[in-house]
Image: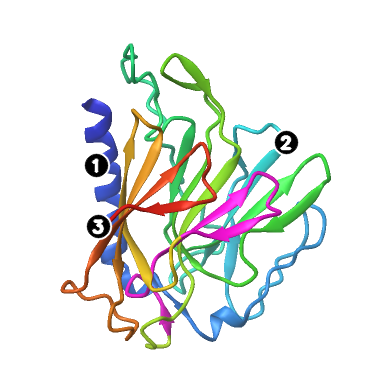
Amino acid sequence: MKYLINFIFLIGVFSCKQQKDAKEQSISLRETTATFDTSSGISSSNNFTQLNTTPNDLVLTGNDKIRLLPIYKIPPSHDKNILYDQGTSFDNEKEILKEDDYRYYMPGIDIIKGYNLVNIGHYNSDKGLLSYFFKKPVLVRTLYFPGVHKDSLGKKEVNRNFFLVSVYNEDTNHDSLINNKDYRRLFYFDILNETQISLLPTDYSAIRSSYDFKNDIMTIRARKDENKNGDLEKSEPISIFLLDFKNPTILKQVY
């Protein structure tokens, strides 16, 4: 319960911050013309021509050879040396239970909540290679990645070998901005960033998710743009999708 309260509080803090700076939480179509440098080496230069950005600290993952490099948009009012507090969903104080003995929000999976987060760099230390999840700037809502700390589920160790990214990546409502008024999509990436899969159907937008620890499944509520106008209206239908973490490349619609 304490962990749940902490998590809700964390989400609330991010939500308040996002509402306060709503105008900064967007990317113009002009800014999406920027491209990302995919050359080898973590020290490769920032190659954005239309978007002022900054990298954050390298993020450790559950795979010792893979590190992540969040790339943030710098709002005009901020210093270029800004360092974003990425936090973690790991709870050191959570009391271990007999059946549900995990300390991340979802076992084995840590998260970063996006705030002006426009891409994720993927660094493979074996190959000395820096690549990116997206070729163009996007607006990341949530990044899910293998956590550094070990979790267990049903008394078995949990090891994740994939990434999930909840993201706004298209101006679906044609207002010349990419922001939270557009479709929120969900992408799967394999551990080496060699395979990318868009999981939701193209006319659906994710609303929220929850976790079924008995079956190790992520439940996703999504709204369908039934009239295909690019806007998501409360009168439009909601569907339920299931993402089985044993096979996270396929999203199953159950309603």
Given contact means CB atoms under 8 Å apart, are the residues at marks 3 and 1 in contact?
no
Q: Quadrant of the C terminus?
A: bottom left
Asked which secondary structure carries label 2, the reply is loop
Q: Residue furthest top?
A: 98
Coloring scheme used: rainbow
Give x and y (percent) for residue 72.
Answer: 53, 61
For marks 1 and 2 on the same chain, the one whose residue lies earlier in the sequence: 1
Determine the image quadrant of residue 21.
Answer: bottom left
Give x and y (percent) for residue 56.
Answer: 58, 52
Q: Which residue is mark 2?
A: 65
| Rendered residue at 43%/56% (across/down) | 114
Asked which secondary structure carries label 3, the reply is helix
Q: Which residues are magenta?
A: 177-199
In the displayed structure, does residue 119 sit left or right of residue 143?
Answer: right
For marks 3 and 1 on the same chain, the one whose residue lies earlier in the sequence: 1
Mark 3 belongs to which amino acid?
Answer: Cys
For marks 2 and 3 on the same chain, the one whose residue lies earlier in the sequence: 3
Asked which secondary structure carries label 1, the reply is helix
| Rendered residue at 24%/49% (across/down) | 12
Q: Which mark is residue 16?
A: 3
**Disc 1 to disc 2, how far (Cα)?**
32 Å
* Residue 146 on the magenta span: no
Q: Which residue is mark 1?
A: 9
**Disc 2 to disc 3, how far (Cα)?**
35 Å
